[in-house]
């Protein structure tokens, strides 16, 4: 219900074509579809730069199908994240044109109705191969939003020359996503090399003192490189959305 | 030492005007000034979109003066953050043209050589008045970088209509900084209202279960609004730099 | 052993129909049934407004049957929470009139001897579909206690208009239970909208920085909306009992 | 802006006495007073059962005076919590009819425009004398709201007979606030004795493993007594508001 | 109110010298003195092996005096712990026969009415001199209870021979209190050397990763020496009471 | 190598029947059996009051058999804790006279060569049936050491009268073990009722804010009942050994 | 690209045999092999004293084979850590000369191209048999690097004489690795006995308050023995590399 | 008491010049001086490579003097760490030849009897000027031990070229100490550049999510550079001792 619709509604009231009571009722009802078990938010794509998204865990396969079906009515990009094999099979049976990206055993991203290609050089850099699941979720969502991200994997700071080999790309990027677990130091080094916005994704890669991603998270938040910003642990989806906000 | 300088150096070697040994030495020396107790990084403004900055705590007033003096040689914006009253007095004695912003007892931001005004509607929203110190640090740095941020204070979600009153501004912003302590819920609500990039600053406002900002930090990282990104607790400076990266 | 019984006992002593030694012994014995592995507390329904309840995990199916059998002797509502499929099968074999509500794989609530309907408009609001297991445990217990709660699912604050659509209901409620994981911000927004008592249930929905419900828990405890009260993570049963205390 | 006002506004539009543009503008402006540094929420007393409240820490004495002045225009109860001696002096100079309750060095509650006495037997029970500051904040706010709470201090469970001596009061209460630090066990014992709603306030009393109130907080949330609900550490104000919601 | 008193009361009822109502009232009142701000528990010395104790922090000096006065009416040992200089001065002014032990700036233990000497060889071992405050609180309370503990200071395991020099004493002790901060390893080594009960007191001595005593606490709880038991951080008072329970 | 043996050795040196070099070597070798993968400590029963014990997890079944065999050579009680079904089968095949106590799926205690009955009334009290695994480990070890503990299950403080029914036993005990998860409040109440030594065992029973036993652990360490001592989470073995130290 | 190569490159530029543009390109490219999913760092053996290593978890068996193949081209030691059974089978199929060491179910270390024996007495000491997995990973890597470590297992400080029996070896060592879980006290005792460098490896052995290795980690970092240094939880590989750095 | 002394003692027994009882006594007494409040360990310099050290906090100035006096009797290096101004004044009054290094307000290191210069190129690298207190403590102790460390300050990874300028020194070092707060990333980068042993000192520099050094600590322990080892937060003394162990 954008500003134009609001004025139009009020005009209808003035002109007597809409009763005040009805207008009051409508003013309180903003657009979403109530499926009973979920309130599908059709307004999101208008309000935000982000796709319509369904988070798989905790939903039945049937619920996933129903929500995806509802979301696709508007034609904007739809994303199903962290889908189980069973959920993937179900949504593909109903919506066979989905793009499936698999990252880890029984953890996939499925996208529909991808946006046309849009400008913006987005670089996704990972510290190690164990960070690829989060990085791949990020690139799958960026792809659905119309970006064509480049991935540079395995640039951990213990071999800092591997990162320096991509300095040109880092300097030329419009946005950089850094995906790193363990000590998460890559974000600081990248942040010192590029003037582009840097979105840091801590990952749960590592063991023991890596504390399932908490160490990388804290380190990225404490980065000595100014202006790094951080999303949740393993949240490749969130990083893609943050980039979309920045480049819209 | 940018790409042009690198080629020029190598050309000098080929033309015999620079001995290989001298070139090797120079290649290893990138531009910074070694003050003994600090290595002042003149390259930062080139590499990053952020200002030359000095973090006050733990430095003597004399060190602050010396570093500020060194940093100002290039004319780009210089920022002294979290300065004590003694540090403020010392740097103003030496560099009287500094802009001082005071947030809390004995915690000030001082800036010099502010950049000319640049486009970009930046909105800084706070949940409560206790979040103003971090918000003010953020706006002081944004000012120095040439932005003219607007501040909307005291929009906590317990009175969500206070926030809704600024929906137009939120929707029209190029970047929004949300500054909130306690449960940090404001970031989620703002993120659901605007398509602009949202930088969330958790603050240490609150007591008990607010855990000196950790609760707001975790909540912002777990936000159900997609694409929110987060900086460290009370890190208004970092949020300003993140905005500068996004709008450069 | 209520006050009347106490006076009666003492009168018996005075009249010589009860020996002091026997009275002393009886005074020390309050009413519960000792099954050996459990002390079933028949007094609870008198002392508290809450149902007789059995917590499934860690008990054998046979123990569950035995305790349920003991508890049902008084006719007040009996609840078995977090029951495994095996436990459900066993208690239904012995007590076939149980109402089974399933929330998640192998996690059910079974109730017997539900109280007659009682007044009180109770609204259960969830932030997302992943919060439904805790919400459903809550409504199953409320049902057994005679309340007829309404559920409004999937009202996360990132699409705050979904919540505002239920403002009338929120304002008219006698008690509201807010069930939310991730950043738990829904409790604050609801608390700002209604004057009714608000019981917040943090859930373990989410991943990474959501810390299995700890983030939502801390956020709800730090809510800027005054007078929100909180129960344990995923504790739908506890929220139902809290509501029962309030509306009794 | 209640429902009646909304209909009235729309009627004005229909009758042509209000231009649609003006109505649209007004619809976006809900009632609060913008003091620049704070947005005073006059709507709160309507929306919630809680008083207009100012949280002292981080505010200047002048700001406190200004906000209190604004809040008092409506005549509903106004509360200033955690006020410093300087703040107390300033607000009393401007509003000399304030009721001051001092709990700890430089930590006071000031109230104005207390509500007339209202029914509801509220019992505030503390585990030790060190819990009195939080308990006293709670009773000061309850008093302002019109309740006349009774306080039973120093009932720690290590001498459980001290608590049992108040069993009659506990059973007859309409609401019980339990204020306890250290291991917070009092909430469980009280919850087992009374059928009334129990609001538990963990306090920071204790040292070492008491972890400044976190231990009591966790213990209260994990209580084996069903239906206990919990507010933040030392949050006597929140407990009073929770009671007010329950008894309204 | 011991068993004899209970029978006597019931006999009085039977003989008609006590009305049932009065008996009922008396049965509900167990012995403590209500000072208004505190419920002094005269029954504790009967029920427990521990002294009547007052914890200083958070109490006014006047309250300390009043409670000590009340507690001393029975002649059993009275202890005031963690007393400030002001509290010490006040209680000595009223009760000049107190024994004062000072551990740290403004942190003293004061005892009155010490029990006569009783058997039991109690050894208090500390890892370093920084552990002496907790150790001294422990020995002051043990002294008041009639034990004559021996202290062996500064036996940290980095110089394990310092401990081995006291092996004979360790083996001959009836109870050993181990007081250690930092990594708390001393408890494990002592537990491996002696068959006596070992009470471990973690202290807040140390910095950084010692986490103000949490590290020592966790280490002592995880000790590879079987049968070590642990009290709270810096809780020398608790350790003394634990020893008193064991040797009574 | 006790004191007598040391003097005898030195006498042999003086009399020339032992060469100094041989004596030096022997002085460095204290009695244990090196199995290569384990150093079995035959001295422990002498040095400590505790049994020879093997902790099952992480050991192969063959290793368990070998260590048990070695330990049994001296005839003192031997305990295998937390044994898997495979380990139980293996040790029983080799040592068929073991006493097996099963607590939970695939978690058993096996004991051999139990000590003859010894005096000492030991009471083991649990808060709920979910605490029985730790309690049973405790009683199995106590049995092996010659104690005949009594168990009183399911005395949670929410129904405090269930505990009060055992007051006589609590007062008459020589040692009490309190086994409780969730908020662990039972330890405080028991500690206030009895003068006997109280060993508190926090358990991992509960969910969410119970934090797998950490909440009960912290609560027990912060108990307001003086002189409670605590062992590690779920450590029934440790509690039994602590009791053995106290009653030896 | 060592210093000699740098001068040679620059000489080529001066002599005209290398175009400046090509030199600039080469200067930016340091030696690693980009496999697409991984950047294999051939420079590491030159820059560091540590082996080429592959961390198994999160990689497909095929990726492991490909990386091992690439790494072996240089003939320096190659290590695959934490390999699953499937990964072990795959790499052995391709590189049958690997040395496999198995520590735990489905967790093996595989090494190739071990270095020739080198001097340095390295002692690996463990507290218990449950620490053997980390200890064995450490010795497997040390072996591959040419060291011939000695292992002394099961020296927990509860039987400190077991450790003292190895004092001669400890004093004579060039480096000592201490592997211990639970309370980690062994590191402090060893550090007090030897002048050699001590690398402490906390392990996740233990349960409850051992917090999966965090307790041992904190304790080792807080050790009262000066100069102990610590690696991550269960990080036997890291400890071996630390020793290699020290003895190179 | 080294091996030679042990044989000599036994020879005296054989030759009858030492009574067995006296020998037994002496064998149990290893060399330390008991000052009552402290057991000064003269054996440490023999057993360990580290200096005799006194940790200032918690000791009176008089105690510091007494311990320093005792320690200096052997002529090996003596170190007083974290000394207050009052302690410094006292020890200098008694031992005027001490070398004082001041790092922060009221926090100094004092050393006596420094060892003669010894070989070993030790490099101390800091991330920022706020890390200088810990770095200076480290160099003061290294100096006392005879090393002549070089300090390279302010090499944070956000300007990685500042570090690369010291690559030659890093590669040529015998040991490198990395001192860094905030995200601690410097340790990983340094560890990737040099083959020397790297001792990482996390510092409490930073605020908010830096968690007073815990973030840097965790990050260093999780470093992707193999073989980094870590000491406690701000523990410059420990790092110096670790280096001394390595280079002895």
Image (cartoon, coloured by chain):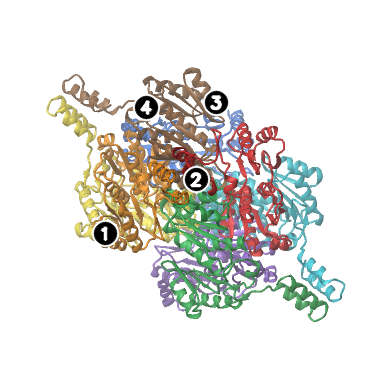
Chain colours: A blue, B yellow, C cyan, D purple, E green, F red, G brown, H orange
- Name the spot of residue D175 as percent of width and height, x first: 64, 66
In the image, D101 versus B125, the foreground residue is: D101
The secondary structure type at the circle numbered 4 is loop
Q: Which residue is mark 2?
A: F11
In the image, B30 versus C9, the foreground residue is: C9
Quadrant of the snapshot with the C terminus of chain D: bottom right
Q: What distance separates the C-alpha of mark 4 from that of mark 2?
A: 46 Å
Q: What distance separates the C-alpha of mark 2 from that of mark 3?
A: 59 Å
- Name the spot of residue D116 as percent of width and height, x first: 59, 75
Q: Is residue C43 visible?
A: yes
Q: Chain of mark 1?
A: H
Q: Nearer the viewer, mark 2 or mark 3?
A: 2
Q: What distance separates the C-alpha of mark 3 from that of mark 4?
A: 31 Å
Q: Which residue is mark 3?
A: G85
Q: Which mark is residue H95?
A: 1
The secondary structure type at the circle numbered 2 is helix
- Name the spot of residue D197 as percent of width and height, x first: 65, 63
Neighbourhood count class around disc 4 (C-alpha, 10 Å): few under 14, some 14–19, many 20 upward: few
Q: What distance separates the C-alpha of mark 1 from that of mark 2?
A: 47 Å
Q: Nearer the viewer, mark 3 or mark 1?
A: 1
Q: Chain of mark 3?
A: G
């Amino acid at each position: 219900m954008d500003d134009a619709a609001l004025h139009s509604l009020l005009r209808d009231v003035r002109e007597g074509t809409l009763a005040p009571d009805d207008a009051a009722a409508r003013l309180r009802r903003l657009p979403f579809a109530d499926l009973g078990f979920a309130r599908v938010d059709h307004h999101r794509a208008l309000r935000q730069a982000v796709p319509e998204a369904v988070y798989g865990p905790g939903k039945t396969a049937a619920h996933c199908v129903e929500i995806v079906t509802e979301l696709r009515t508007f034609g904007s990009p739809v994303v199903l994240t962290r889908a189980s094999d069973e959920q993937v099979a179900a949504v593909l049976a109903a919506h066979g044109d989905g793009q499936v990206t698999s990252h880890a055993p029984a953890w996939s991203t499925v996208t529909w109705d991808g946006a046309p290609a849009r400008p913006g050089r987005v670089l996704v850099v990972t510290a190690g191969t164990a960070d690829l699941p989060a990085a791949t979720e990020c690139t799958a969502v960026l792809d659905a939003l119309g970006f064509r991200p480049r991935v540079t994997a395995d640039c951990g700071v213990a071999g800092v020359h591997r990162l320096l080999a991509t300095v040109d790309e880092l300097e030329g990027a419009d946005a950089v996503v850094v995906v790193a677990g363990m000590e998460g130091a890559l974000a600081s080094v990248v942040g010192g090399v590029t003037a582009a916005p840097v979105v840091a994704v801590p990952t749960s890669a590592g063991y023991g003192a890596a504390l399932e991603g908490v160490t990388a998270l804290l380190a990225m938040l404490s980065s000595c490189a100014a202006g790094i910003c951080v999303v949740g642990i393993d949240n490749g989806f969130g990083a893609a959305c943050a980039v979309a906000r920045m480049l819209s």
